[in-house]
Image (cartoon, grey):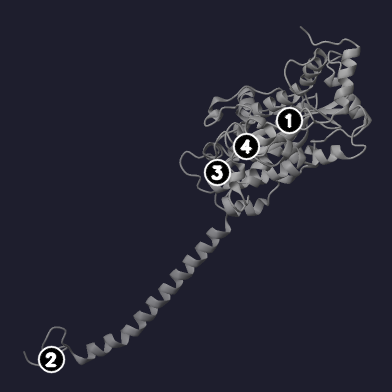
Amino acid sequence: MPPGSGPGSLRGVPRKTIGRNARMRPSAAARFAALVTVTAAVDVLSNAVAMAVPRPRNTGIGRRSRLGMSDTLKALSDNDFRLLFRMERNDFNALLELVRDGLRTNHAMAILAAGQPIPADCRLALALRLLAGASYLDCMLAFGLGRCTVFDVFHQVLNVLDCTPELNNILFPTTQSDFDRQSHLFARDGRNPLRGCVSAIDGLAVRIRRPSVRDAPNPIAYYNRKGFFAVNVQAAVGADFKVQFLSAIATGSCHDSDAFSASGLSRHLAEDGSLPDGYWVAADDAYVAGRRVLTPWPGRNLPWERDSFNYYQSSARIFVEQTFGQLVGRWGILWKPILFSLPTATRSIRVCAKLHNFLIDRSSAVPPVLQDDTVGGSGEVLFQDRHDNDTRLRHRRRDGEKCPLRVAMTRFLKVNQVRRPA
Protein backbone atom coordinates (compact mmCIF):
# COMPACT_ATOMS: atom_id res chain seq x y z
CA MET A 1 0.00 0.00 0.00
CA PRO A 2 1.50 3.36 -0.99
CA PRO A 3 2.48 5.66 1.84
CA GLY A 4 -0.29 7.94 2.96
CA SER A 5 -3.04 5.82 1.39
CA GLY A 6 -4.15 3.87 4.51
CA PRO A 7 -7.33 4.31 6.60
CA GLY A 8 -7.63 7.78 8.07
CA SER A 9 -5.41 9.28 5.37
CA LEU A 10 -6.19 12.83 4.19
CA ARG A 11 -5.09 12.06 0.63
CA GLY A 12 -7.70 13.36 -1.77
CA VAL A 13 -9.29 15.85 0.71
CA PRO A 14 -9.05 19.48 -0.44
CA ARG A 15 -6.65 21.57 1.64
CA LYS A 16 -9.31 24.33 2.11
CA THR A 17 -11.65 21.87 3.86
CA ILE A 18 -8.91 20.66 6.14
CA GLY A 19 -8.07 24.20 7.22
CA ARG A 20 -11.70 25.09 7.98
CA ASN A 21 -12.18 21.99 10.24
CA ALA A 22 -8.98 22.71 12.07
CA ARG A 23 -10.12 26.22 12.81
CA MET A 24 -13.52 24.95 14.20
CA ARG A 25 -12.07 22.42 16.70
CA PRO A 26 -10.82 24.95 19.34
CA SER A 27 -14.19 26.70 19.33
CA ALA A 28 -16.17 23.45 19.99
CA ALA A 29 -13.78 22.42 22.75
CA ALA A 30 -14.26 25.75 24.46
CA ARG A 31 -18.03 25.45 24.31
CA PHE A 32 -17.88 21.91 25.74
CA ALA A 33 -15.63 23.02 28.61
CA ALA A 34 -17.99 25.88 29.43
CA LEU A 35 -20.96 23.47 29.48
CA VAL A 36 -19.14 21.13 31.89
CA THR A 37 -18.27 24.04 34.19
CA VAL A 38 -21.89 25.28 34.32
CA THR A 39 -23.20 21.76 35.02
CA ALA A 40 -20.74 21.28 37.87
CA ALA A 41 -21.69 24.64 39.37
CA VAL A 42 -25.39 23.72 39.28
CA ASP A 43 -24.67 20.40 41.02
CA VAL A 44 -22.67 22.12 43.78
CA LEU A 45 -25.43 24.68 44.30
CA SER A 46 -28.11 21.96 44.44
CA ASN A 47 -26.14 19.97 47.02
CA ALA A 48 -25.62 23.08 49.15
CA VAL A 49 -29.36 23.84 49.16
CA ALA A 50 -30.18 20.23 50.01
CA MET A 51 -27.78 20.27 52.97
CA ALA A 52 -29.21 23.53 54.27
CA VAL A 53 -32.77 22.15 54.45
CA PRO A 54 -33.18 19.50 57.25
CA ARG A 55 -34.75 16.33 56.00
CA PRO A 56 -36.64 13.84 58.20
CA ARG A 57 -34.51 10.87 59.08
CA ASN A 58 -35.38 7.67 57.25
CA THR A 59 -36.70 5.56 60.12
CA GLY A 60 -36.90 2.39 58.04
CA ILE A 61 -39.73 -0.02 57.50
CA GLY A 62 -41.74 -0.80 60.61
CA ARG A 63 -40.13 1.91 62.77
CA ARG A 64 -42.15 4.72 64.22
CA SER A 65 -41.67 8.43 63.70
CA ARG A 66 -40.34 10.20 66.78
CA LEU A 67 -43.01 12.86 66.43
CA GLY A 68 -45.64 10.17 67.03
CA MET A 69 -44.15 8.77 70.24
CA SER A 70 -46.04 11.13 72.56
CA ASP A 71 -49.30 10.36 70.78
CA THR A 72 -48.65 6.65 71.26
CA LEU A 73 -48.20 7.16 75.02
CA LYS A 74 -51.45 9.11 75.22
CA ALA A 75 -53.31 6.42 73.31
CA LEU A 76 -52.43 3.69 75.83
CA SER A 77 -55.17 2.57 78.18
CA ASP A 78 -54.64 3.29 81.88
CA ASN A 79 -54.16 -0.41 82.62
CA ASP A 80 -51.59 -0.89 79.84
CA PHE A 81 -49.79 2.27 80.92
CA ARG A 82 -49.55 0.98 84.50
CA LEU A 83 -48.23 -2.40 83.35
CA LEU A 84 -45.64 -0.92 81.01
CA PHE A 85 -44.24 1.87 83.19
CA ARG A 86 -44.98 0.46 86.68
CA MET A 87 -46.92 3.55 87.80
CA GLU A 88 -50.16 5.39 87.17
CA ARG A 89 -50.38 7.97 84.41
CA ASN A 90 -50.74 10.87 86.85
CA ASP A 91 -47.64 9.63 88.73
CA PHE A 92 -45.74 9.58 85.43
CA ASN A 93 -46.82 13.13 84.64
CA ALA A 94 -45.78 14.34 88.10
CA LEU A 95 -42.39 12.68 87.72
CA LEU A 96 -42.00 14.19 84.26
CA GLU A 97 -42.51 17.70 85.63
CA LEU A 98 -39.74 17.09 88.18
CA VAL A 99 -37.18 16.03 85.58
CA ARG A 100 -38.30 17.90 82.45
CA ASP A 101 -35.67 20.64 82.74
CA GLY A 102 -32.90 18.07 83.09
CA LEU A 103 -34.09 16.25 79.95
CA ARG A 104 -33.95 19.31 77.67
CA THR A 105 -31.76 18.93 74.58
CA ASN A 106 -30.46 21.23 71.86
CA HIS A 107 -33.41 21.22 69.46
CA ALA A 108 -31.47 22.41 66.40
CA MET A 109 -28.64 19.93 66.92
CA ALA A 110 -31.12 17.10 67.43
CA ILE A 111 -32.73 17.90 64.08
CA LEU A 112 -29.38 18.00 62.30
CA ALA A 113 -28.16 14.79 63.95
CA ALA A 114 -31.29 12.65 63.75
CA GLY A 115 -33.95 14.52 61.83
CA GLN A 116 -36.27 14.76 64.85
CA PRO A 117 -35.73 15.41 68.58
CA ILE A 118 -36.84 12.82 71.12
CA PRO A 119 -39.55 14.34 73.37
CA ALA A 120 -38.90 14.46 77.11
CA ASP A 121 -41.88 12.24 77.93
CA CYS A 122 -40.59 9.57 75.54
CA ARG A 123 -37.11 9.74 77.05
CA LEU A 124 -38.56 9.16 80.50
CA ALA A 125 -40.86 6.42 79.21
CA LEU A 126 -37.95 4.59 77.58
CA ALA A 127 -35.90 4.64 80.80
CA LEU A 128 -38.85 3.42 82.85
CA ARG A 129 -39.42 0.56 80.41
CA LEU A 130 -35.83 -0.60 80.87
CA LEU A 131 -36.14 -0.29 84.66
CA ALA A 132 -39.39 -2.25 84.40
CA GLY A 133 -37.48 -5.14 82.86
CA ALA A 134 -37.94 -4.62 79.12
CA SER A 135 -35.23 -5.63 76.66
CA TYR A 136 -33.40 -2.87 74.82
CA LEU A 137 -34.46 -4.66 71.62
CA ASP A 138 -38.11 -4.09 72.53
CA CYS A 139 -37.35 -0.42 73.19
CA MET A 140 -35.63 -0.08 69.81
CA LEU A 141 -38.76 -1.36 68.08
CA ALA A 142 -41.29 0.49 70.26
CA PHE A 143 -39.58 3.89 70.15
CA GLY A 144 -38.04 3.71 66.67
CA LEU A 145 -34.49 4.24 67.92
CA GLY A 146 -31.13 2.67 67.27
CA ARG A 147 -29.26 0.61 69.84
CA CYS A 148 -26.75 3.31 70.79
CA THR A 149 -29.50 5.92 71.07
CA VAL A 150 -31.50 3.70 73.43
CA PHE A 151 -28.54 3.36 75.78
CA ASP A 152 -27.61 7.04 75.51
CA VAL A 153 -31.13 8.08 76.46
CA PHE A 154 -31.24 5.58 79.33
CA HIS A 155 -27.99 6.85 80.82
CA GLN A 156 -29.11 10.46 80.46
CA VAL A 157 -32.46 9.86 82.20
CA LEU A 158 -30.86 7.68 84.87
CA ASN A 159 -28.42 10.48 85.72
CA VAL A 160 -31.22 13.06 85.86
CA LEU A 161 -33.38 10.87 88.12
CA ASP A 162 -30.43 10.28 90.44
CA CYS A 163 -29.45 13.96 90.65
CA THR A 164 -32.85 15.69 90.80
CA PRO A 165 -33.10 17.39 94.24
CA GLU A 166 -36.82 16.60 94.55
CA LEU A 167 -35.97 12.89 94.36
CA ASN A 168 -33.35 13.07 97.10
CA ASN A 169 -35.73 11.12 99.31
CA ILE A 170 -33.60 8.33 100.84
CA LEU A 171 -33.29 9.88 104.30
CA PHE A 172 -32.60 8.28 107.66
CA PRO A 173 -34.56 9.72 110.64
CA THR A 174 -32.68 12.55 112.32
CA THR A 175 -35.22 14.53 114.35
CA GLN A 176 -37.22 13.70 117.46
CA SER A 177 -40.46 13.91 115.50
CA ASP A 178 -39.06 11.39 112.99
CA PHE A 179 -38.06 9.02 115.79
CA ASP A 180 -41.46 9.26 117.48
CA ARG A 181 -43.36 8.79 114.24
CA GLN A 182 -41.43 5.67 113.26
CA SER A 183 -41.64 4.24 116.76
CA HIS A 184 -45.42 4.64 116.66
CA LEU A 185 -45.68 2.99 113.23
CA PHE A 186 -43.46 0.05 114.21
CA ALA A 187 -45.59 -0.46 117.34
CA ARG A 188 -48.54 -1.33 115.07
CA ASP A 189 -51.10 0.60 117.09
CA GLY A 190 -49.85 -0.93 120.33
CA ARG A 191 -49.79 -4.54 119.19
CA ASN A 192 -45.99 -4.59 119.50
CA PRO A 193 -44.85 -3.79 123.05
CA LEU A 194 -41.25 -3.13 121.98
CA ARG A 195 -41.16 0.66 121.59
CA GLY A 196 -38.42 2.80 120.12
CA CYS A 197 -37.75 1.05 116.80
CA VAL A 198 -37.01 3.60 114.07
CA SER A 199 -35.73 1.38 111.26
CA ALA A 200 -35.19 -2.19 110.09
CA ILE A 201 -32.14 -3.28 108.09
CA ASP A 202 -31.39 -6.23 105.85
CA GLY A 203 -29.33 -7.18 102.81
CA LEU A 204 -30.52 -7.86 99.28
CA ALA A 205 -28.56 -9.80 96.66
CA VAL A 206 -29.04 -8.12 93.27
CA ARG A 207 -27.76 -10.15 90.33
CA ILE A 208 -25.39 -8.51 87.88
CA ARG A 209 -23.18 -9.62 85.00
CA ARG A 210 -19.53 -10.38 85.71
CA PRO A 211 -17.88 -7.00 86.43
CA SER A 212 -15.00 -5.91 84.24
CA VAL A 213 -11.55 -5.51 85.74
CA ARG A 214 -11.83 -1.81 84.98
CA ASP A 215 -14.84 -1.53 87.30
CA ALA A 216 -13.72 -4.04 89.96
CA PRO A 217 -10.09 -5.10 90.56
CA ASN A 218 -11.30 -8.48 91.84
CA PRO A 219 -14.42 -9.45 89.87
CA ILE A 220 -14.60 -12.95 91.39
CA ALA A 221 -15.42 -11.37 94.76
CA TYR A 222 -18.89 -10.64 93.37
CA TYR A 223 -19.50 -14.37 92.83
CA ASN A 224 -21.55 -15.83 95.69
CA ARG A 225 -22.09 -19.35 96.95
CA LYS A 226 -25.35 -19.71 95.01
CA GLY A 227 -23.43 -19.53 91.75
CA PHE A 228 -24.04 -16.05 90.33
CA PHE A 229 -22.52 -12.58 90.38
CA ALA A 230 -24.28 -10.09 92.64
CA VAL A 231 -24.08 -6.83 94.55
CA ASN A 232 -24.77 -6.86 98.29
CA VAL A 233 -27.29 -4.06 98.80
CA GLN A 234 -27.68 -2.92 102.39
CA ALA A 235 -30.92 -1.07 103.05
CA ALA A 236 -32.75 0.39 106.03
CA VAL A 237 -36.48 0.98 105.78
CA GLY A 238 -39.17 2.54 107.92
CA ALA A 239 -42.55 1.25 108.95
CA ASP A 240 -44.01 3.41 106.17
CA PHE A 241 -42.20 1.09 103.69
CA LYS A 242 -39.89 3.88 102.51
CA VAL A 243 -36.18 3.27 102.02
CA GLN A 244 -34.25 5.31 104.60
CA PHE A 245 -30.74 4.23 103.66
CA LEU A 246 -29.18 2.31 100.79
CA SER A 247 -25.63 1.15 100.13
CA ALA A 248 -24.59 -0.88 97.07
CA ILE A 249 -20.82 -0.93 97.52
CA ALA A 250 -20.30 -4.46 98.86
CA THR A 251 -19.56 -7.53 96.76
CA GLY A 252 -21.95 -10.43 96.36
CA SER A 253 -19.78 -12.79 98.41
CA CYS A 254 -19.66 -10.37 101.36
CA HIS A 255 -21.48 -11.22 104.60
CA ASP A 256 -24.25 -8.86 105.72
CA SER A 257 -22.41 -7.82 108.87
CA ASP A 258 -19.27 -6.90 106.92
CA ALA A 259 -21.26 -5.04 104.29
CA PHE A 260 -23.12 -3.14 107.00
CA SER A 261 -19.86 -2.29 108.78
CA ALA A 262 -18.55 -0.78 105.55
CA SER A 263 -21.68 1.30 105.03
CA GLY A 264 -22.28 4.84 106.15
CA LEU A 265 -25.19 3.82 108.38
CA SER A 266 -22.94 1.72 110.60
CA ARG A 267 -20.64 4.68 111.12
CA HIS A 268 -23.62 6.95 111.76
CA LEU A 269 -25.10 4.67 114.43
CA ALA A 270 -21.71 4.41 116.12
CA GLU A 271 -21.67 8.17 116.73
CA ASP A 272 -22.90 9.56 120.01
CA GLY A 273 -26.23 11.29 119.59
CA SER A 274 -27.17 9.52 116.36
CA LEU A 275 -30.17 8.01 118.15
CA PRO A 276 -31.52 9.04 121.55
CA ASP A 277 -31.37 6.45 124.31
CA GLY A 278 -34.14 3.90 123.97
CA TYR A 279 -34.34 4.08 120.16
CA TRP A 280 -32.97 1.27 118.06
CA VAL A 281 -32.70 -0.47 114.70
CA ALA A 282 -34.01 -4.01 114.09
CA ALA A 283 -31.82 -6.57 112.31
CA ASP A 284 -31.72 -10.33 111.86
CA ASP A 285 -29.10 -12.69 113.25
CA ALA A 286 -26.72 -12.05 110.33
CA TYR A 287 -25.81 -8.76 112.01
CA VAL A 288 -23.81 -8.19 115.17
CA ALA A 289 -25.91 -6.99 118.09
CA GLY A 290 -24.78 -3.71 119.59
CA ARG A 291 -25.78 -0.60 121.44
CA ARG A 292 -28.35 0.53 118.85
CA VAL A 293 -28.71 -2.59 116.67
CA LEU A 294 -31.04 -5.21 118.18
CA THR A 295 -30.93 -8.76 116.88
CA PRO A 296 -32.81 -11.88 118.08
CA TRP A 297 -31.58 -13.92 121.02
CA PRO A 298 -29.54 -16.88 119.72
CA GLY A 299 -30.34 -20.51 120.43
CA ARG A 300 -33.31 -22.84 120.66
CA ASN A 301 -35.65 -23.77 123.49
CA LEU A 302 -35.26 -20.27 124.92
CA PRO A 303 -36.94 -19.02 128.10
CA TRP A 304 -40.37 -17.64 127.34
CA GLU A 305 -39.34 -14.01 127.79
CA ARG A 306 -36.52 -14.34 125.23
CA ASP A 307 -38.82 -16.20 122.89
CA SER A 308 -41.34 -13.35 123.25
CA PHE A 309 -38.65 -10.79 122.52
CA ASN A 310 -37.66 -12.64 119.35
CA TYR A 311 -41.27 -12.77 118.22
CA TYR A 312 -41.91 -9.05 118.62
CA GLN A 313 -38.49 -8.12 117.28
CA SER A 314 -39.19 -10.14 114.11
CA SER A 315 -42.49 -8.27 113.83
CA ALA A 316 -40.44 -5.10 113.36
CA ARG A 317 -38.12 -6.76 110.82
CA ILE A 318 -41.00 -7.81 108.61
CA PHE A 319 -41.23 -4.25 107.25
CA VAL A 320 -37.88 -4.50 105.48
CA GLU A 321 -38.83 -7.83 103.92
CA GLN A 322 -42.11 -6.39 102.67
CA THR A 323 -40.35 -3.32 101.28
CA PHE A 324 -37.89 -5.51 99.38
CA GLY A 325 -40.86 -7.40 97.97
CA GLN A 326 -42.46 -4.16 96.75
CA LEU A 327 -39.19 -2.86 95.31
CA VAL A 328 -38.39 -6.02 93.39
CA GLY A 329 -42.02 -6.54 92.42
CA ARG A 330 -42.25 -3.11 90.81
CA TRP A 331 -38.92 -2.89 88.97
CA GLY A 332 -38.27 -5.86 86.70
CA ILE A 333 -34.63 -4.90 86.17
CA LEU A 334 -34.11 -6.50 89.60
CA TRP A 335 -35.72 -9.79 88.51
CA LYS A 336 -32.72 -10.91 86.46
CA PRO A 337 -29.03 -10.08 86.10
CA ILE A 338 -28.46 -6.38 85.36
CA LEU A 339 -26.46 -6.37 82.13
CA PHE A 340 -25.05 -2.86 82.44
CA SER A 341 -21.61 -1.99 83.81
CA LEU A 342 -21.13 -2.14 87.57
CA PRO A 343 -21.42 1.66 88.12
CA THR A 344 -24.59 1.79 86.00
CA ALA A 345 -26.02 -1.24 87.80
CA THR A 346 -25.54 0.31 91.25
CA ARG A 347 -26.99 3.61 90.05
CA SER A 348 -30.00 1.75 88.61
CA ILE A 349 -30.60 0.13 92.01
CA ARG A 350 -30.42 3.51 93.75
CA VAL A 351 -32.80 5.12 91.24
CA CYS A 352 -35.27 2.25 91.69
CA ALA A 353 -35.25 2.94 95.45
CA LYS A 354 -35.79 6.67 94.88
CA LEU A 355 -38.69 6.01 92.53
CA HIS A 356 -40.10 3.55 95.07
CA ASN A 357 -40.11 6.28 97.74
CA PHE A 358 -41.60 8.77 95.28
CA LEU A 359 -44.48 6.40 94.53
CA ILE A 360 -44.99 5.53 98.22
CA ASP A 361 -45.47 9.24 98.92
CA ARG A 362 -48.10 9.28 96.16
CA SER A 363 -49.80 6.14 97.55
CA SER A 364 -49.21 4.29 94.28
CA ALA A 365 -49.82 0.55 94.58
CA VAL A 366 -47.45 -1.98 93.00
CA PRO A 367 -48.99 -3.06 89.67
CA PRO A 368 -49.22 -6.72 88.64
CA VAL A 369 -46.34 -8.31 86.77
CA LEU A 370 -46.15 -7.99 82.99
CA GLN A 371 -45.25 -11.52 81.92
CA ASP A 372 -43.13 -10.42 78.93
CA ASP A 373 -40.81 -8.56 81.32
CA THR A 374 -40.14 -11.68 83.42
CA VAL A 375 -38.29 -13.51 80.63
CA GLY A 376 -34.90 -14.53 82.00
CA GLY A 377 -35.81 -13.85 85.63
CA SER A 378 -37.93 -15.11 88.48
CA GLY A 379 -38.91 -11.98 90.40
CA GLU A 380 -37.72 -13.69 93.58
CA VAL A 381 -36.41 -11.57 96.46
CA LEU A 382 -32.87 -12.83 97.13
CA PHE A 383 -31.86 -12.09 100.71
CA GLN A 384 -28.12 -11.71 101.06
CA ASP A 385 -27.76 -13.85 104.20
CA ARG A 386 -28.48 -16.93 102.07
CA HIS A 387 -25.89 -16.14 99.41
CA ASP A 388 -22.65 -14.92 101.04
CA ASN A 389 -19.46 -17.01 101.10
CA ASP A 390 -18.33 -16.23 104.66
CA THR A 391 -18.88 -19.41 106.69
CA ARG A 392 -16.90 -17.96 109.60
CA LEU A 393 -19.45 -15.21 110.24
CA ARG A 394 -22.43 -17.42 109.47
CA HIS A 395 -21.41 -19.92 112.18
CA ARG A 396 -20.01 -17.50 114.74
CA ARG A 397 -20.91 -17.66 118.45
CA ARG A 398 -23.59 -15.00 118.95
CA ASP A 399 -24.22 -15.50 122.66
CA GLY A 400 -21.22 -13.31 123.52
CA GLU A 401 -22.50 -10.22 121.70
CA LYS A 402 -23.28 -7.42 124.15
CA CYS A 403 -26.60 -5.62 123.71
CA PRO A 404 -27.77 -3.88 126.91
CA LEU A 405 -30.99 -2.60 125.34
CA ARG A 406 -32.01 -6.13 124.33
CA VAL A 407 -31.49 -7.26 127.93
CA ALA A 408 -33.56 -4.34 129.24
CA MET A 409 -36.44 -4.97 126.84
CA THR A 410 -36.49 -8.68 127.61
CA ARG A 411 -36.67 -7.85 131.32
CA PHE A 412 -39.58 -5.49 130.60
CA LEU A 413 -41.51 -8.30 128.88
CA LYS A 414 -40.82 -10.65 131.80
CA VAL A 415 -41.86 -8.16 134.48
CA ASN A 416 -45.08 -7.28 132.67
CA GLN A 417 -45.78 -10.89 131.68
CA VAL A 418 -46.02 -10.01 128.00
CA ARG A 419 -45.96 -13.30 126.13
CA ARG A 420 -46.06 -13.97 122.45
CA PRO A 421 -49.46 -14.96 121.03
CA ALA A 422 -50.22 -18.65 121.21
Residue 367 vertical position relative to residue 163 in the rendered view, above or below:
above
Label number found at residue 145: 3
Label number found at residue 130: none
Q: Is residue 195 shown left or right of residue 39?
A: right
Residue 320 vertical position relative to residue 171 in the rendered view, above or below:
above
- Which quadrant: the N terminus? bottom left
Tell which circle, 2 or 4, labels the residue nearer the N-terminal end. Answer: 2
Disc 4 marks which amino acid? Asn
Q: Which residue is mark 2?
A: 4
Label 2 vs label 3, nearer the camera: 3
Residue 118 visible to the viewer: no
Residue 72 visible to the viewer: yes
Q: Position of residue 215 (x, y in %)?
A: 63, 50
Residue closest to the eye, 281 or 406: 406
Tell which circle, 3 or 1, labels the residue nearer the N-terminal end. Answer: 3
Disc 2 marks which amino acid? Gly
Q: Residues within 10 Å of mark 2 (few under 14, many from 20)?
A: few
Q: Which residue is mark 4?
A: 389
Tell which circle, 2 or 3, labels the residue nearer the N-terminal end. Answer: 2
> How far, Cα to Cα, is label 2 from label 1?
120 Å
Q: Residues within 10 Å of mark 4 (few under 14, many from 20)?
A: some
Residue 157 vertical position relative to residue 73 in the rendered view, above or below:
below
Q: Which residue is mark 1?
A: 397
Residue closest to the eye, 11 or 196: 196
Label 2 vs label 4, nearer the camera: 4
Label 2 vs label 1, nearer the camera: 1
Which quadrant of the view contains residue 34? bottom left
**What secondary structure is marked by label 1?**
loop
**What secondary structure is marked by label 4?**
loop
> How far, Cα to Cα, is label 2 from label 4?
103 Å
